[in-house]
Image (cartoon, rainbow, N blue to C red):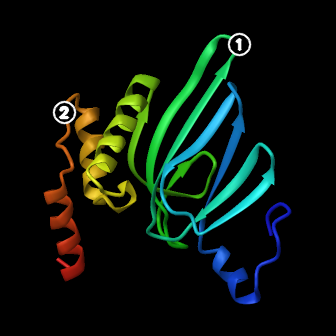
């Protein structure tokens, strides 16, 4: 058991090992980690500044990490990750245990801010960003890395993804 969380039922105790844990820290104007989207299955509050969210395998979520010191911002990063199943290969990501399948990563506040705007636009179309095709997030990552403009994730594109997923295509 991590921290001071209430004990889990015996059947749930095994299941916790299958989850991806994300430790979030919030020390105002110093270290700020937050989840922009994603559906956790469990939350554990460690203290007033730290908590751990747990995500089921296959869940897509966005983790934003920001840090500053007396000289200004030292870290601005947004990662869109897919929680992995136990034993699956994954990439190391600070504060994420065991790690995740990185679908998108941007560094630097201007890029992070633009990604947050893209996520806002997806939500404005009535689409939950956690339900967006993983291939779209990879597309956005690759296009941004190449200095190109990514395609918009439209409701039509989302319907096509959902249909393909439902039919197993």
The local crowd at label 2, few if under 14, some if 14 to 19, many if 20 or more residues have their Cα within 10 Å, is few
Above or below, comparing residue 57 to residue 60 in the picture? below
Q: Mark 1 or mark 2, which has the lower sequence index?
A: 1
Give residue 27's position: percent from left, percent from top: 73, 33
Q: How many marks?
A: 2
Circle 2 sits in a helix, a strand or a loop, which is it? loop
In this view, the residue farthest toward the bottom is: 11
Q: Quadrant of residue 131?
A: bottom left
Give the left or right position of residue 53, taking residue 128 as reference. right
The local crowd at label 1, few if under 14, some if 14 to 19, many if 20 or more residues have their Cα within 10 Å, is few
Above or below, comparing residue 127 to residue 141 in the picture? below
The residue lying at 50 percent from left, 72 percent from top is 85
Which part of the image, by quadrant, shows the C terminus?
Answer: bottom left
Circle 1 sits in a helix, a strand or a loop, which is it? loop
Give residue 13's position: percent from left, percent from top: 73, 81
Q: Marks 1/2: CA distance?
A: 35 Å
The residue lying at 51 percent from left, 63 percent from top is 39
Residue 43 disc label:
none
In this view, the residue farthest toward the right is: 4
Q: Which residue is mark 1?
A: 70
Give residue 92's position: percent from left, percent from top: 54, 51
The residue lying at 70 percent from left, 26 percent from top is 30
Q: Which residue is mark 2?
A: 149
Which part of the image, by quadrant, shows the N terminus?
Answer: bottom right
Above or below, comparing residue 4 to residue 124 in the picture? below
The residue lying at 49 percent from left, 34 percent from top is 77
Residue closer to the observer: 36 or 13: 36
Residue closer to the observer: 75 or 8: 8
């Amino acid at each position: 058991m991590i921290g001071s969380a209430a004990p889990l039922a015996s059947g749930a105790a095994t299941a916790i090992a299958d989850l991806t844990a994300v430790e979030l820290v919030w020390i105002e104007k110093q270290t700020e980690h937050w989840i922009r989207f994603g559906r956790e299955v469990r939350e554990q509050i460690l203290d007033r500044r730290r908590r751990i969210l747990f995500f089921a395998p296959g869940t897509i979520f966005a983790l934003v990490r920001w840090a500053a010191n007396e000289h200004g911002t030292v870290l601005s990063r947004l990662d869109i990750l897919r929680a992995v199943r136990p034993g699956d290969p994954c990439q190391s990501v600070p504060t994420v245990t065991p790690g995740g399948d990185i679908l998108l990563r941007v560094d630097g506040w201007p890029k992070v801010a633009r990604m947050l705007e893209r996520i806002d636009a997806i939500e404005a179309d009535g689409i939950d960003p956690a339900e967006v095709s993983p291939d779209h997030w990879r597309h956005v990552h690759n296009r941004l890395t190449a200095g190109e403009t990514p395609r918009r994730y439209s409701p039509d594109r989302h319907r096509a993804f959902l249909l393909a997923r439902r039919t197993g295509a």
